[in-house]
Image (tube, rainbow, N blue to C red):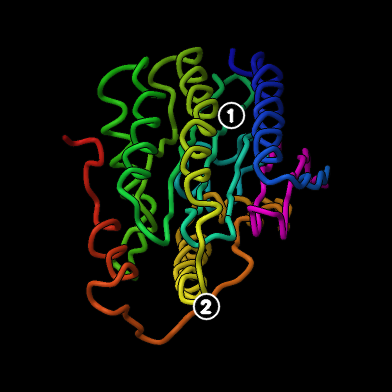
């Protein structure tokens, strides 16, 4: 039964968090704050946060394991058959906002969910993914990121990467702006079709591939020279990131409605953001190329 595996999944997630933080600390040179917390309704977690680092203006790598007697409205509305069931959810979620505008923001999440009721089979699934949000597009970065995502899924069948890539494109899309949040990656949820062991292994493969996907990109850009123009555009585009997280993101809504820790849930917000009324970059400029050449959905692995 999946419930017998939850302790092992929790141990793996905690180890993943520790490994990623160790790698990021080596890049930045500044330690991440450690903040362990408890949730009065059940469960808790460990937040690892950096602010005003040498490389990361803000970043967090969170572990959470929360539980309850009944699902919050946002979740039971999507899956009404789970209403009234006891539940637990655990995962690692990270967002990194480098200071350098040429270094993209990145998000990664892996998670496990289970709902139980007396006399009924447990309902469980895995979810996760990662996506890249550049401010100045770079084709080599996008190809490397998508290739790593492809390679993480390849052992589990040839159909998963196209499906999860399209799912990411559709999910991280600002419908009110009619534009993508970034250049995508992979996203999956409600994964149980492969059986428990293979579904868990797929989640682990995605989590383990994060540093391979992102750190080479960060290394290429973190020390590039930039000026106020680039910082200003970065702050403007970060506004789109905030809009998506607060308006459309299913995880943010679930966390807030389930009584999660607000500081940890909103850790993903960038520290400096700007909005302008109906502003458009100069046609043909590097800023304009983000919208014309990188945000439209495309197959980054095509020859």
Question: Farthest residue toward the bottom?
Answer: 277
Q: Work out whether residue 67 can be spotted.
A: no
Residue segment shown in magenta: 39-68
Residue in the foreground of this view, choosing between 297 and 128: 297
**Residue, x 25% and y 24% (percent of image)?**
159
Q: Is residue 125 above or below residue 105?
A: above
Majority secondary structure of magenta residues: strand
Residue for badge 1: 114
Left/right placement of residue 272 relative to residue 78 reads: right
Left/right placement of residue 270 relative to residue 129 reads: right
Real-space Cα distance between discs 2 and 1?
39 Å
Element type at mark 2: loop
Q: Work out whether residue 190 can be spotted.
A: yes
Question: Farthest residue toward the left?
Answer: 303
Does residue 223 belong to the magenta stretch?
no
Q: Is residue 239 above or below residue 78?
A: below
Element type at mark 1: strand
**Residue, x 64% and y 53% (percent of image)?**
55
**Residue, x 73% and y 53% (percent of image)?**
261
Residue 11: x %, y % from top left? 71, 21
Residue in the foreground of this view, choosing between 216 and 201: 216
CA neighbours of label 2 inside 10 A, class few (<14), some (14 to 19), many (20+): few
- Image quarter of the C terminus: top left
Residue for badge 2: 274
Left/right placement of residue 153 relative to residue 234 reads: left
CA neighbours of label 1 inside 10 A, class few (<14), some (14 to 19), many (20+): many
Residue 241: x %, y % from top left? 48, 63
- Image quarter of the N terminus: top right
Does residue 46 belong to the magenta stretch?
yes
N-term-proximal mark, 2 vs 1: 1
């Amino acid at each position: 039964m999946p419930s017998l595996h939850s302790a092992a999944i929790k141990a793996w997630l905690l180890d993943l968090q520790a490994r990623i933080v160790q790698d990021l600390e080596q890049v930045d040179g500044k330690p991440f704050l450690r903040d362990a917390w408890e949730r009065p309704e059940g469960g808790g977690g460990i937040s690892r946060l950096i602010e005003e680092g040498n490389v990361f203006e803000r970043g967090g790598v969170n572990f959470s394991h929360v539980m309850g007697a009944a699902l919050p409205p946002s979740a039971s509305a999507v899956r009404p058959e789970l209403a009234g069931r006891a539940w637990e959810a655990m995962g690692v979620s990270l967002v990194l906002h480098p200071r350098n505008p040429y270094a993209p923001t990145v998000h990664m999440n892996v998670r496990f969910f289970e709902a139980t009721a007396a006399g009924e089979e447990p309902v469980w699934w895995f979810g996760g993914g990662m996506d890249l949000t550049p401010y100045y597009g770079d084709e080599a970065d996008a190809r490397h990121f998508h290739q790593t995502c492809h390679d993480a899924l390849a052992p589990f069948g040839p159909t998963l990467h196209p499906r999860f890539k399209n799912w990411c494109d559709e999910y991280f899309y600002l419908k009110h702006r009619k534009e993508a949040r970034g250049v995508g990656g992979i996203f999956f949820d409600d994964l149980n079709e492969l059986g428990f062991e293979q579904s868990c292994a797929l989640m682990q493969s995605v989590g383990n591939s994060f540093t391979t996907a992102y750190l080479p990109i960060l290394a290429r850009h973190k020390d590039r020279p930039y000026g106020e123009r680039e910082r200003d555009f970065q702050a403007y585009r970060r506004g789109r990131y905030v809009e998506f997280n607060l308006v459309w993101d299913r995880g943010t809504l679930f966390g807030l409605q389930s009584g999660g820790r607000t500081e940890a849930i909103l850790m993903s917000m960038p520290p400096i953001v700007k909005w302008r009324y109906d502003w458009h970059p100069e046609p043909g400029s590097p800023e304009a190329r983000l919208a014309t050449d990188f945000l439209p959905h495309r197959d980054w692995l095509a020859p």
